[in-house]
Amino acid sequence: MATEVTAPASTLSYEAVRPSLPEIYRTLSVPARGGFFVKLLAFAGPGFLVAVGYMDPGNWATDLAGGSRYNYTLLSVVMLSNLMAVLLQALAIKLGVVTGRDLAQACRDYFSRPVAIGLWLLAEVAIAACDLAEVIGSAIALNLLFHIPLLWGVCITALDVLLILFLQQRGFRFLEALVLALIGTIGVCFGLEIIFSRPDMFGILGGFAPSLRIVRDPGMLYIAIGILGATVMPHNLYLHSAIVQTRAFERTSEGKREAIRFSVIDSTIALTFALLVNAAILIVSAATFFRNGYNTVAEIQDAYKLLSPLLGVTGASTVFALALLASGQNSTLTGTLAGQVVMEGFLNIRVRPWLRRLITRGIAIIPAIIVTAFWGERGTADLLILSQVILSIQLSFAVFPLVMFTSDRLKMGEFVNSRWLKYLAWTTAIVIAFLNAWLLIQLRT
């Protein structure tokens, strides 16, 4: 059953605002004393929950296409998009720590109710679209590994709702540990794939250097925009600003400064790992498909079928599918948490966690079931692309408020963005908006 708080946001002090994810709010203690690594360990975790969104199945198609068509050239785009993500997630951390509100709550406080409702609806559509990509990715992995029909695989993915509820009852650290284990699985799998594929190291180094070819070649530019558009996930900004509040740090200026410092380090380390994973997908694609003349590999199923024969390693395709399964399940875990943050933050209502997650999963599974039942593998591939387009449309509606709030001295006080950071943040927001708008224009032509 849902309940609503009717007190106006302007009259609420920090303590009076009911947090999102109340079952895990300030449940993890932070030692008052201790060295650098002790403090870092206490704050470590949220960054990795967020990082899984940057290595989800929605990114795989663009990385596979980029590597198979253009060799290592688009590695520079992977790196640039990751740097943007590091900046925006750091701003989300700052907003959550300093104001005590997640991004959804901050939007509800600042904007009129009609605008807040509109932003909520856009956020819900984006989360459903992201969840849809994870559902499809997990179903494809189950099909490749265990020959489970895609339709049944889509239905099986709903069981992660029960897993989240069980882990949260055991404590938020258990959920973080599971996510970290799955990230480790992805990393090990692609580490093996790189060893199997024996890439050109000089080609990799050259790929990280920006090239004017990316702008001049329409096909390359299209893939590059797709990589950028699929990397920065809007729901991660809402989620990160909420889960940094699971730590019971001191609400003093020094305590907040320390929380921001260690949380940003946690986030940066996690996103660097995500960069390595995304780069590894593109590198394996380039070293395996481009090198052997397969320049049109963009579908996950095609990559799976070709890996073992081309590399001459029997288990290469299985390792690839295992990484895909870990990626899909990881992202569904964090996506459902983001859905709870968005609903509770924008609407200031409380819905039982199991009900909220069933709603989120249902919204994602229903279209996936319909498309899978009628159109099969081809339909799921098209639906995966569509989900990324929807995410692109919504992204700026999360980025612009985030930059605006963290640049507002009335909200942030001494923690307001410095002048150089403000310029950099606004430039990033405008670039993302332009690139995503250009992606939509390209998709219509």
Image (cartoon, rainbow, N blue to C red):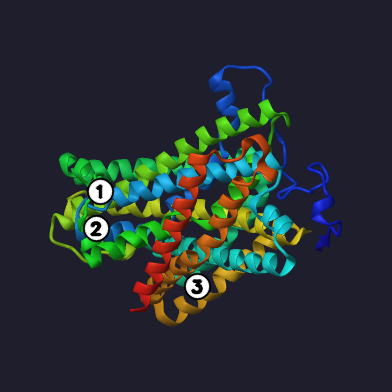
Looking at the rendered structure, which numbered label has been put on residue 144? none
Task: Please tell me how crowded label 3 is: few (under 14), some (14-19), or many (20+) other residues with Cα within 10 Å.
Answer: many
The total of numbered circles placed on residues is 3
Is label 1 in a helix, a strand or a loop?
loop
Label 1 – label 2 distance at C-alpha? 8 Å
Task: Please tell me how crowded label 1 is: few (under 14), some (14-19), or many (20+) other residues with Cα within 10 Å.
Answer: some
Looking at the rendered structure, which numbered label has been put on residue 214? 2
- Residue 282 in view of the camera: yes
Q: Position of residue 365 (x, y in %)?
A: 55, 70
Is label 3 in a helix, a strand or a loop?
helix
Question: Of the residues shown, which amino acid type is indicated by label 1?
Answer: Pro
Question: Of the residues shown, which amino acid type is indicated by label 2?
Answer: Ile
Nearer to us in this view, 151 or 391: 391
The residue indicated by pointer 1 is 210
Label 1 – label 3 distance at C-alpha? 37 Å
Q: Residue at x 35, y 61 (%)?
A: 225
The residue indicated by pointer 3 is 368
Q: Residue at x 53, y 75 (%)?
A: 367
| Viewer-side label of 3, 2 | 2
Mark 1 near mark 2, Cβ–Cβ under 8 Å?
yes
User: Is 137 situated above or below 284?
Assistant: below
Mark 3 / mark 2, whichever is N-terminal: 2
Label 3 – label 2 distance at C-alpha? 34 Å
Question: Of the residues shown, which amino acid type is indicated by label 3?
Answer: Ala
Q: Quadrant of the C terminus?
A: bottom left
Q: Residue at x 32, y 52 (%)?
A: 77
Q: Residue at x 31, y 66 (%)?
A: 299
Q: Position of residue 243 (x, y in %)?
A: 63, 44
| Side (left or right) of 440 relative to 118 | left
| Side (left or right) of 418 relative to 198 | right
